[in-house]
Amino acid sequence: MLKIALKGILARRWRLFTTGIAIVLGVAFISGTEVLSDVLTRGANGLVDAAFSGIDVQVRSSEAQESEFSSQPVRPEVAQSLLDTVGKVDGVAYAAGQIQAQATMLDKKGKALPQFGPPTFVFNWIDDPQLVGGIIVKGRAPAGPGEAALDFKTADEFGFKVGDKVTAQLAKGPQIFTLVGIGGLGENGDKSSGSRNLLLETNQAQELLGLDGKYSYLVVRAAEGVSQSDLAAGIRKVLPPKTEALTGQQLVAETQESIGEIIGIITDLVAAFGWLAVFVALFVIYNTFSILIAQRTKEMALLRAVGAGRGQILGSVMLEAFIVGLVAAVLGMFTGFLLASGLQGLLTQLFPLADEPPRMTSSAVVTSLIVGVLATVLSALAPAIRATRIPPVAAITESAVETRGIGLRRKLVGAAMIVAGTTFVLLAIDERLEPVLNWVGFGSALLFTSVLVIGPTFAGRVTGFLGSPLPKLFGPTGRIAQQNSVRNPKRTTATAAALTIGVGVVVVIAVIAASVKGTVTDVFENQIKADLIVDSGGQIGTGLPPEVQDQVRAIDGVANVSSLRVGPATILNSKDAAEERAKPESERDRNLLNSTAPLGQDTAVFAIDPAAFTGVVDLGTVTPRATALTDDGVMIEKKAATDNGWKVGDEVEFWFAQAQLDTGDGRVKLPIQAIYDEPFAFFGEPAFFITTARFAEVQPPPLNVDNVVYLQITDDTQRAAIKKRVETTIAKLAPIAGVSDIGKFIEDRIAPINSFLNLVYALLALAVVVALVGIWNTLLLSIYERTREIGLLRAIGMTKVQIRRAVRFESATIALFGTVMGLVLGILLSLAFVRGFSAQGIKLTMPIAQLVAIGVGGALAGALAAFWPSRKAANTNMLEAISTQ
């Protein structure tokens, strides 16, 4: 049987090769993800080692607070006086205060550097080669006011040279520096940190960031012969409460793990689409082997007739599947390596973390082989079992025999899969099953698989209806195409199932995206009453200085001005806070496990002037009134009040990192002075409002800047002129800021969603391509099966053009059937997803035009997939075809 299996593979090598393409594509993404993850991890670890190689101990606040605006927890600064204390500890060779804050830089044309990509940080220059982690390779280090150094990656990318002027937006407003040095990490200064770094003299950095007398943390170098652990132990003895000392090794491990989580998000996203492609490929392989077994009925029956047992028949088919899977897995593995190399080139432009040579890892090899072989073998298992049931008497029949009836058991199994899949999806979306994404994926897989199981019960009728216009439009050619798509419902369903999955996922993404964008647009258009909006355009902490709104308010034609600031907070007495404290440590955020800060509900607080803000933003009914909010209170959303049983007069207990630094206890109790009922501008969670004066007391100086300023004007006919005056006024105060109307403001908010969607659609294209490969392969195999039929059609006068059209119309009809099923399943799943997001205020929006385009595109793609098979059918030799048995 081994020889028979090998000869069978060689006899059908091209058919099996086209089958393996589906596995090759799926495995390529999985293999590429493994290689890419290794590249990013090695690059990140190398950069972290270079940056922290000279740090033996880091001293920092032990209180960590989660922030919605940063991947790292927020920690209070440490007092400058602590530096003298640490510097006197035995074993300390050198100690320095380190400042780290976000900033926004301008290029040489006065435009802000792109926010998508490496973040921009401000550091102070430490005059110790080991602690600074790198060297200045051109010029010198900054030594006084108005001087700065820059990392070489940013300097090269934007054309900065020593002597140029560099403008950066900081907490105290825009600052212009003379570039006196360019450097990098490592002994030779040739390694990039992965971020854009602006280095200032220490006193100036403190002044411009509002950190007088404070450092972000301290860094310490040990004396010769003193170990990191011994030095850290000695320093801990002199530290005040709520301060900790980490060894350099602990710091490196913590940073590498944190970066690893970010890398994991990137690679998991890519891998998810690879697994989707493999899932689609399962259907392609199943369909291909089903057709091959049907075509080899006579061969299998002859083997049974000469004494081959069922086990031998099963083994021969599974051996074919194993070899096909093995070859496809190897090809996919190396294709993935090339894919990872290409992706690395793109990522290197954004993140220097990828600047390492790729290598084929053992994990990539093992994963590729296991996935490729298992996917193929499992997909071929059901057709192989069917092959063992072919009776020997089938050897004397004239043609292949394939059962086309749909049994009751199959119908019941399909119905059970629909019920189970729907149940899992709904329970997961309601967070009754966790992890949510895993259960949603499993439920969705059951629903898509149910199409293959129960689809034949309606495939004939649906494809007949979809193809009904063909006979009227194209006569006999159209009738043949319609009948061919109807003649075998099982095959039609199996062929279309792969496309159903691809289209279904595309529809889910399209509907969710349209709903998010529609909700954002609707909320901003209906809730924000501003005529013009001044947007900081920068990162959190690099917004608009308070002088902006003061000067804008004085512009002729401006009637009302209101600013908005945002910062992190922790609520200690809410229902969610109690649930967070009840969680076991294994379910808590890794960054906060060792924090001495109280555990609670992480949220955001917004700073406003109540009277001005409610004039430009509609918060619905406010009880008793918005102006009741004073510096000593908080205004909350009705949903938060209902969920927690709060009412006006009750207290909300907050914890702020900055308040802890200033008073020694970050707990701040604020009575509820007003409750509003209209959710604020689609921030998802209920927003908590405090006054600007209170915000300044509980948030660090870098956050005490305006993120956005809303303007109302007196005369709408003068909008353009007033906008021009505003732009001129703020040009010097905030060169990074932009002035726009509400329409442009909404476009800017939606732009990142569109960019992300483009990436997702590009990755989804892989699954659609695999599905089209399945249609292409099925048609090729059906051409072999219908060789005699095609020859007879040619003999009675059908032209080559008509043969090509018939095959293409058949493919288009099957593709349209798969697309329609994908549309139906995708819409139903998206309804469930949007329902799950309703707590965040998302409302359903159906992108009708996009769904129609998907339907038309599915049919056209099916016709395109039939291009080669249709030409092969048309070129069939008439006489040889008629003589085929």
Image (cartoon, helix red, strand yellow):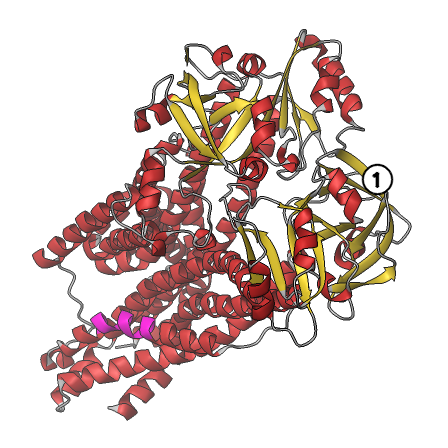
Q: Is residue 218 magenta?
A: no
Describe residue 479's horizontal placement relative to residue 668 as left or right. Answer: left
Closest to the observer, 805 or 710:
710
Describe residue 227's horizontal placement relative to residue 651 as left or right. Answer: right
Q: Amino acid at mark 1?
A: Ile
Residue 321 rendering spot, x and y as whole percentages? 31, 78
Is residue 8 positioned above or below 403 on the image? below
Q: Main secondary structure of the magenta part?
A: helix
Where, by quadrant of the figure, is residue 471 drawn?
Answer: top left
Residue 21 rendering spot, x and y as whole percentages? 43, 70
- Seen at 54% across and 70% down, the residue is 38
Q: Is residue 380 magenta?
A: yes
Q: Give the residue number, with chain letter if any, for mark 1.
A: 176
Residue 553 rendering spot, x and y as whole percentages? 71, 14
Residue 374 rendering spot, x and y as whole percentages? 32, 74
Q: Tell me the magenta residue range.
A: 374-383
